Image (cartoon, grey):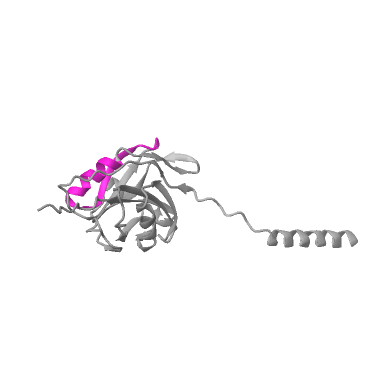
Amino acid sequence: MKQWLLVLMAFGCARTLMAQTPADPEKPLFQPAQTISVSDVAMPAACIANGTVVLDALITEEGKPQAVEVRRDIDCLTGLAMDAVKEWKFSPATVKGNAVASRIAVAVTVCPAGSMAAPLSVGTLKPQSDAAIQAEFQPPEVLHGKFPIYPMDATAFGTVVLELSLNAKGEAGDVNVLQDLPPFTSHAKDVVGDWRFIAATDNGNPIPSKVVLVFVFRPLPTTNNSF
């Protein structure tokens, strides 16, 4: 009888310890592609449009951009943005540690010189290709954004590139600076929280993901005081 009591007591203690020990959270099976290196997005003086172009870049198992689809378009900006993204370097997405092809969303915003922080239009959403529609992983979608403040004392111009982590609700989290351009970078980071996204999905289930935000700052116009 005493032996049975000891066994029951030991079993009860074991169950109590198991209940008090928190389970290790499982790592998500899908890990999104990440951006390794980027370059400037060239904006010729003849292109005077401002706003945001949104692209979906197909990244191969080797981390190479194989194709770039346009989701939101702005005339003279789109081709230049696509040309730049095709030259970038990526690490591929993985499933259970194995590299897989996937897509990454890139939003390229051209900021008007001297602009104040203000909402911006992201244009009409274009349909995906058949291959993109059939893909198990769907990258996040940009709903709307905001222009950063243009520092009036800036003496440089160029491109700031940020990689933003999104949770399974499409909410912004950590920001990784891929290309820094003081003093513009801090102003770009300030407006990230005002951008809104639809979360990425894997087989229809919302999952954490990455999105790349590019801010192109034009040079301030020069004043001509000559008579």
Q: Residue at x 25, y 40 (%)?
A: 83
Q: Is residue 137 visible?
A: no
Q: Is residue 81 magenta?
A: yes
Residue sitting at the far left: 227
Determine whether, in the image, residue 148 is placed left or right of residue 126: right
Q: Position of residue 162 (x, y in %)?
A: 38, 50
Residue sitting at the far front: 227
Determine whether, in the image, residue 227 is placed left or right of residue 129: left
Q: Can you tell which quarter of the image residue 199 is in?
A: bottom left
Nearer to me, 54 or 96? 54
Q: Position of residue 185 (x, y in %)?
A: 37, 52
Q: Residue at x 50, y 41 (%)?
A: 97
Magenta segment range? 61-85
Q: Position of residue 121 (x, y in %)?
A: 24, 61
Q: Position of residue 78 (x, y in %)?
A: 22, 48
Residue 61 lies, with reference to residue 31, above or below; the image says above
Q: Can you tell which quarter of the image residue 15 is in?
A: bottom right
Nearer to me, 31 or 212? 212
Q: How many marks?
A: 0
Nearer to me, 95 or 203? 95
Q: Is residue 49 visible?
A: yes
Residue 206 lies, with reference to residue 93, above or below; the image says below
Determine whether, in the image, residue 154 is placed left or right of residue 3: left
Residue sitting at the far right: 2
Considering the image in quadrants, where does the N terminus appear? bottom right
Q: Is residue 74 magenta?
A: yes
Q: Residue at x 69, y 62 (%)?
A: 19
Residue sitting at the far top: 62
